[in-house]
Image (tube, helix red, strand yellow):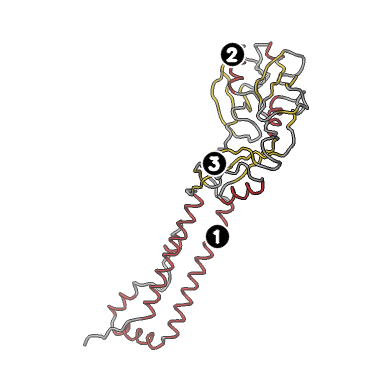
Amino acid sequence: MATEYKFNYGKFFKSIIVLICLVVLVIFGRRVFERHFFNTRLTVIPDVTGLDKKEAIKYLKEAGLKVKVINSKTEKVPLDTVHNQDPRPGKEVKVNRVVRIWVNNGEDVKVPNIIGLELLEARSRLKGQNIQIETIDYYPSNQKYNTILGVYPKPGTKLEINQKISILVSSQQMIDPSVMPNITGLDLNDARELLKQIGLEIGSISQTNDPTLPINTIISTNPAAGTKIQRGQKVSVVINNGASIKKRARSNEEIINRSQQNINQKEIEKTIDDTINQIDNNNPKNSQQDNKQQNSNPSDNSNNNGTSNEPSGDGGDDDN
């Protein structure tokens, strides 16, 4: 006599719940993965010129952008008003892109007193004040090589917007062609021209990052300054490339989000187990009938065992 089949509501609801949870995890995990690892979200840079500083920063951040404020003086706009921005408005970029805005703070930028500093330190200080160097001239003197001898306009002079300065640097060691000069702090092209004067040339070029220095600034050389050299020898240099070179590392935000996601998954699994247990407790007769059917029909029992009472282990890793 054939065994009468009775629909198992507990297993049906359990399967539905597991399926819904897996779909939620897949959608949630995919969005988190794309947002933090691929950063595929795009945004349009708003036009904030003419806006108040605080209002401009607010609009840019609402667009998913980061802001760098550069203070400068101009008569074109009122105080604390944006008069320029970069990149240009309307451009589509990835979120978290840094947008520079120039704000009128009513204060003049003055030429700092960099006389007596070494060139590398002087360039770092000028970059921190957004002052650009137009020319670097060399003059033999008793000062240490690469020491700033003079600056034009003179220290304390108020600069116009985008006005550049010129500096005069000691070149005493350049007189001796048998000694490697100190070219740290020079622009790569300027250094190449100076080395030609004593029969040297740039060989291999390595790159590193120093956010305090301009791009293409020479940071170190091989042979080092003061080393005996021969005419025709090649010099290896390390320059600043203006961008960090390092392996992609997980940020603190990514680690926190991943941990929170794991916690959410465990809570979902616990909720599923509790729900199933409550359903089983509310249907004791169905559970007893299931046990009888399993004991009387071994073949059906082996088929039923193919359905697990726990959420699949693969479902917890859908976001990986």
- Mark 2: few/some/many CA within 10 Å (<14, 14-19, 20+): few
| Residue 318 % position (x, y) | 43, 59
Query: Closest to the observer: 219 or 163?
Result: 163
Contact between marks 2 and 1 (CB within 8 A): the answer is no
The answer to whether residue 242 is visible is yes
| Residue 250 % position (x, y) | 55, 50
Q: Secondary structure at mark 2?
A: helix
Q: Quadrant of the N terminus?
A: bottom left
Give the residue type at disc 3. Pro
From this view, report whether residue 96 is shown above or below residue 200. below
Name, please, the residue furthest toward the left.
1
Query: Closest to the observer: 216 or 164?
Result: 164
Query: Closest to the observer: 53 or 178?
Result: 53
Mark 3 or 2, nearer chain start: 3
Q: Quadrant of residue 46?
A: top right
Q: Secondary structure at mark 1?
A: helix
> What residue is pinned by disc 1?
259
Give the alpha-carbon distance from disc 2 to disc 1, as whole Å: 58 Å
Mark 1 or 3, nearer chain start: 3
Give the alpha-carbon distance from disc 1 to disc 3, as whole Å: 37 Å
Give the alpha-carbon distance from disc 3 to disc 2, as whole Å: 44 Å
Mark 2 or 1, nearer chain start: 2
Give the residue type at disc 2. Lys
- Return the mark for residue 89: 3
> What residue is pinned by disc 2?
196
At x 49%, y 65%, the residue is 265
From this view, report whether residue 35 is shown above or below residue 13. above
| Residue 181 % position (x, y) | 66, 18
At x 54%, y 21%, the residue is 203
At x 66%, y 41%, the residue is 69
- Which-is-in-front pick, marks 3 and 2? 3
